[in-house]
Amino acid sequence: MDGPYRVVLFDVGGVLLSNGWDTAARRACAAEANLDWDDFQRRHALVAEAFETDAIGIDEYLQRTVFHVDRPFDRTDFIRHMENQSEPFPESLKVLDELASRPGGPLLGVLNNESRHLNDYRLATFGLRDRFTVFLSSCYLGLRKPDERIYHTALDIVGVPPPACLFIDDRDLNLECARDLGMATHRFTDASGLRDRLRDAELLP
């Protein structure tokens, strides 16, 4: 047994849902829109951090990456394609629901990297606003993983010392930075492993 944990923070993309705007999602949209992939990817890399920390919104992002030249489609069409890349992970959501339904359970929060438009869309569309209490998204905090400051800020907001917080993510570097601060971590690979980890922590029966 480990814990006890007063807070459990979940990454979203790759844990509860498919990734919102990763390489695979961008490739799918680029192919659908017949974009030059190399040009699109190069432009994306230059503004990705600003996009995910809300220094620029989706209109400016698309202006820099897609609509710097005339296109035979409009922004609404492209945004719809962006949104359509998101899919739920039903088994992971089932584990989350089991955890959220336990009386006296830990505070549940999101700690994720996402642009504001996609973050708001995904939280609403897949019912995550009803499942979580705290939303520590890069677009709200102006910081993104694995920047050490986002973990400090998250802990300040939830108000617990690092050992009282369990952080779940699918990427090693994000977990490494959290562990360096003393947070407990779990590397997500599948819902079964997540359930076992929560049982070991006596958060699930």
Image: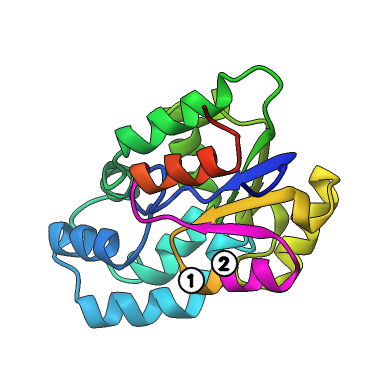
Residue 98 can be seen, yes or no: yes
Instruction: Decide if residue 1 is on the left or right side of residue 21.
Output: right
Q: Which residue is mark 2?
A: 175
Segment tinted magenta in the rendering: 175-191
Residue 188 magenta:
yes
**204 above or below 82?**
above
**Viewed as shown, does residue 165 lie left or right of 52?**
right
Give residue 22's position: percent from left, percent from top. 35, 63
Residue 113 in view in this figure:
no
Q: Amino acid at mark 1?
A: Asp
133, 1: nearer the viewer: 1
Relative image position of residue 94 (x, y in whole percent): 39, 28
Task: Identify the element where label 1 is drawn.
Answer: helix
Answer yes or no: do the residues labelled 1 and 2 have beta carbons within 8 Å?
A: yes
The image position of residue 117, as x and y in percent, is 50, 45
Name the residue tied to disc 1. 172
| Residue 180 coordinates in the image, percent (x, y) | 70, 74
Residue located at (54% from left, 43% from top): 200
Mark 1 nearby-residue class (10 Å; few <14, some 14–19, many ≥20): some
